Image (cartoon, grey):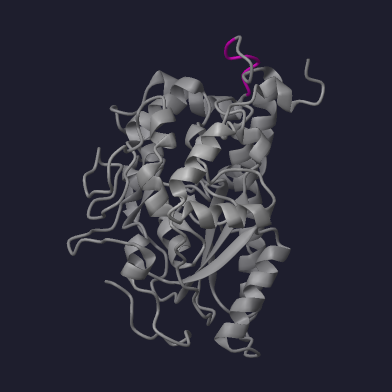
Amino acid sequence: MSVSSKCQTCPGPCATDEEAGFSVAPDYTRFSQKRDIFCRSQWDPAVHSAASDRFYESYRRPLPQWRNVDGYSQRDFAVRNAGWHVADIFAERLEPERREGFLDFLSAHREGSQTKFEGSDASATAREIKKVARLFGADLVGIARYDERWVYSHKYSAVDSDETPMDLEEDYSSVIVVCHEMDHDLLTTVPSALSGAATGVGYSKDVVTLLALAQYIRNLGYRATASMNDTASSIPYAIKAGLGEYGRHGLLIAPGLGPRLRIGKIFTDLPLAHDRPIRFGVKDFCAVCRRCSDACPPGAIAKGSPSDSVHNISNAEGLVKWTTDAEKCFDFWAKQVTDCSICIRVCPYNRDYPRWLNRIRFRLMGSVLRHVMLWLDNAFGGGKRRPPRRWWPNAT
């Protein structure tokens, strides 16, 4: 399905797949969450290992020291796990199979209003939603039309290690996508346990924003289901919501922030006008820049052109895109006892310049000057790793 028809809330036709840069085969089938690499690490012998067990355990009980290497001390693990604390509290507060935010949608809501608010048209309501989302902490927010293709066909149950029916209601009309910026200075220390705090803080902020925004919508008398990594693939919705483009490393690249962000989403029946995808030359730049694939220690990131080939069952089939080998990626994470964001650190779109300068940089990177901008980024040492100890204020 390539959405192009006029919907009830948009002033014109909704964005097509072509406008968003999607290439979806007619035989594309929805992805089951059981095939996600993190779920496979629980049930699949090809992925599960003693190293993966230690990886997960390190988030529950901080290691005093994993090895005598800068960035893996007790304080590094301590701040990483503290950054994850809010997200983990919500993930673990109910039955183990729920894992809210990662296996199942967030459910900590009060009962909403029985009377629907009818004060604004769809375009005005969309502007109001964005203002409220930013009030609740979102750095970026966009709105896309609900598209069943990106919703998982099944959920994963951690209790019996099997699929369960997807129970998301199918008559939602819109998906609100929010993004939170990951701390740039922490990401310069990748790979390290310290840098993992940037990921955890992003998810913890996601929880707060999504729950508050969903409750606001419920208070208006409409339905809202808050979701992080659960329920559906976030990046296709983010692209359709006009928040960025798809990069070689398989991440969303947004103007100003690059790939330095965490994504959350809310499914709702609140009448909202939908945003349109944006294009600022990411695909052409990534075609000549292989900084992420060259820097990836396990060689998990594609070096060639986008294609429909897949590495293993953790990749969605029927899409033409750059596809990362999730098995190689996760194996490196497990051995490092923390998540890896080397591809984010080295990405030329990830630079902590003033927003106005980044806007100029991004525009030039999407032009015929992309080779010059890549050379300049290399010349100025863009993406160089910073010793983790230098992040701490009393560094010696």
> For residue 319, which quarter of the picture?
bottom left
Residue 377 vs residue 295, the one in the foreground: 377
62 sits to left or right of 299: right
The reply to whether residue 110 is in sight is: no
Q: Position of residue 151 (x, y in %)?
A: 37, 61
Name above or below for residue 277 compared with residue 383: below
Residue drawn at (65%, 68%) of the image: 215
Instruction: Assign the magenta stretch its main secondary structure.
Output: loop
171 versus 86 height, above or below: below
Compared to residue 273, the image places residue 206 above or below, namely: above
Which residue is outermost to the right? Answer: 394
In this rendering, would 274 be left or right of 321? right
Out of 6 and 31, give the one closest to the viewer. Answer: 6
Q: Would you say residue 62 is visible in this rendering?
A: yes
Screen quadrant of the N terminus:
bottom left
- Residue at image coords 72%, 27%: 391
Q: Residue at coordinates 70% horizontally, 51% vertically from top-left?
A: 354
| Residue 92: percent from left, percent from top | 57, 42
Residue 297 position, x and y percent, is: 41, 24
Image position of 94 (left or right of 330): right
From the image, which quarter does the C terminus lie in?
top right
The vertical placement of 30 against 11, above or below, is: above
Range drawn in magenta: 62-67
Residues 306 and 91: in front is 306
Task: Specify the farthest residue to the top.
Answer: 68
Q: Is residue 126 magenta?
A: no
Query: Residue lying furthest left in this view?
Result: 27
Which of the 4 image quarters holds residue 395? Answer: top right
Instruction: Describe residue 302's horizontal placement relative to residue 171 as left or right.
Output: left
Q: How many marks?
A: 0
**Position of residue 246 measured from the top left corner of the image (x, y, whole percent):** 41, 53
What residue lies at 45% left-to-right and 20% top-to-bottom?
A: 335
